[in-house]
Amino acid sequence: MFKKIDIVCITLSTPILIGIYEDKKLINTIECSEKSSEALPKIFQSFLATYEIKKIFYANGPGSFMAIKIAYIFLKSLSILKDIPLFATDAFYFNKNQPIKAIGKLFFVKISSEIKTQKLEIAPQSSFKLPDVLDYSEFTNITVPSYGIGAV
C-alpha cells in the first residue's frame, strides 16, 4: 500500500519546486533546473509509482506564460486521467507577497486581493518557497491560469 500524499508545484521560474506533503506537512522537496515540459513527466512518473496522490496544488500565476501553460495542461490532464483533484492559488502565496517579474521593469504586485503591474526601477530580490504546512483554505478549485497581463 502506497503512502498517501499531496503534491505542490511551483513551476513559474527556475528552479521548479515540488513539495510532497503528508497530513499537510512538508516531508520532501524536489528542486529541478530543467524546463517544466521535461521535468514534470519524469517527476510525476516517479511519484505515481511510489505514492498515492490525494490532491495536487499549483501556483497558477502570475509568472512565465509558457511555464504556467505547461504546468496547467500537464496537471489538469493528470487530474482528469487519474481522478486526482487539482487546486490552485496565486504565486504570491509562495513568496510572502513580494513583487514578481513581468517584463522589462514591470512587476506583478498584489494589493489587497487584486493583482496589478507596477513599474519598479530597482528589481526586488524575491524567491518562491514551499510552505512547511499546507493551508488548504488558500487554494481554490478554479485552476485556470492567471497570467496577470495579456499575452505579448
Image: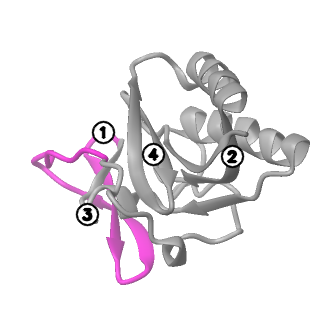
Label 3 Cα neighbours within 10 Å, binned few <14 / some 14-19 / many ≥20 = few
Q: Provide the residue designation for mark 1.
A: 104
Horizontal and vertical percent position of residue 128 = 31, 47
Give how far apart the Cα atoms at labels 4 and 2 are. 26 Å
Indicate whether 39 appears above or below 94.
above
Give how far apart the Cα atoms at labels 3 and 2 are. 27 Å
Label 1 Cα neighbours within 10 Å, binned few <14 / some 14-19 / many ≥20 = few
Q: Residue at x 41, y 58 (%)?
A: 25
**Residue extent of the magenta highlight:** 103-128
Q: Are marks 3 and 2 in contact (CB under 8 Å)?
A: no
Query: Looking at this rendering, what residue extends furthest in the right direction?
Result: 81
Disc on res. 96:
3
Q: Provide the residue designation for mark 4.
A: 63
147 and 46: which one is in front? 46
Label 2 Cα neighbours within 10 Å, binned few <14 / some 14-19 / many ≥20 = many
Give how far apart the Cα atoms at labels 1 and 3 are. 22 Å
Give how far apart the Cα atoms at labels 1 and 4 are. 13 Å
Q: Amino acid at mark 1?
A: Gly
Q: Of the residues tagged 2 and 1, which is closer to the observer?
A: 2
Q: Of the residues tagged 1 and 4, which is closer to the observer?
A: 4
Give how far apart the Cα atoms at labels 4 and 3 are. 15 Å
152 and 49: which one is in front? 49
Q: Amino acid at mark 4?
A: Gly
Q: Residue at x 63, y 30 (%)?
A: 47
